[in-house]
Amino acid sequence: MRKPKLLIVDDDKMLNHNMSWLLSRKGYEVSSANDGESALQMVENQDFDVVILDQKMPGMDGVTTLRELKKKRPNLEVIILTGASSVDSAVKGFEFGAYDYTTKPMQMDVLEEKVMQAFERKLLLE
C-alpha cells in the first residue's frame, strides 16, 4: 500500500518542521503550512490524503480550518492536534468531521499509526 500524502498545518514553525522532517524520512510525501488560510489554498491546488492540523493558531483556528477543508474536500481525513486538552474542542472537531484528536506533545509512532488508520478509512470511503 502506498503511503498517504500529508499536509501538516501548525503555526509552531519548529514543530511543523520537525514533524515534516520525521515523516518524510519514513517515506511520506509531506507538505506544510503555517496557518489555516495557507492550508486552504494548498488543498485547492493539491490532493492530500490526511491533514495534521493544529487546533490553536492565530487567525483561523483549527476547527474553522477543519470546517473549510471539509467543504472543499469532504473525503479528506483530518487529525487535530492541540497543546491543551479540551473536551469542547474535541466535540466540535468531531462534529465537523475530524478523524481523530490528540494532544501535544505526541509520540511520532502514535501519530504515524493514527495517520495510517485515517488513510485506510479514506481509501475505504472512496
Image (cartoon, helix red, strand yellow):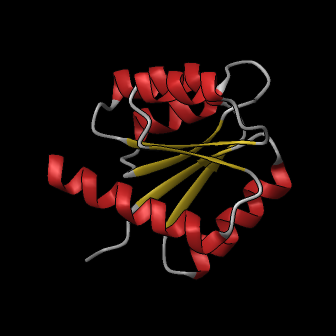
Q: Residue at x 67, y 23 (%)?
A: 61
Q: Residue 9 location, x and y as percent?
A: 64, 43
Q: Which residue is depicted at the point 68% across and 68% down?
A: 107
Question: Residue at the spot x=78%, y=42% of the render?
Answer: 83
Count of numbered circles on the image = 0
Give residue 80's position: percent from left, percent from top: 57, 41
Q: Where is residue 29 drawn, in percent x and y?
A: 48, 67
The one nearer the camera, 98 or 126, is 98
The residue lying at 36 percent from left, 47 percent from top is 47
Occupied quadrant, residue 34: top right
Q: Is residue 123 above or below residue 62?
A: below
* 79 horizontally vs 102: left or right: left
Quarter of the image for the N terminus: give it.
bottom left
Residue 16 appears left or right of 42? right
Task: Name which quarter of the figure residue 5 lies in.
Answer: bottom left
Image position of 64 with respect to 76: above or below: above
Along the line of sight, the residue nearer the viewer: 80 or 36? 80
Q: Is residue 105 above or below residue 103?
A: below
Above or below, 80 relative to 17:
above
Seen from the viewer's position, the closer of residues 2 and 106 is 106
Front position in the image: 53 or 24:
53
Compared across the picture, whether 8 is left or right of 1 comes to: right
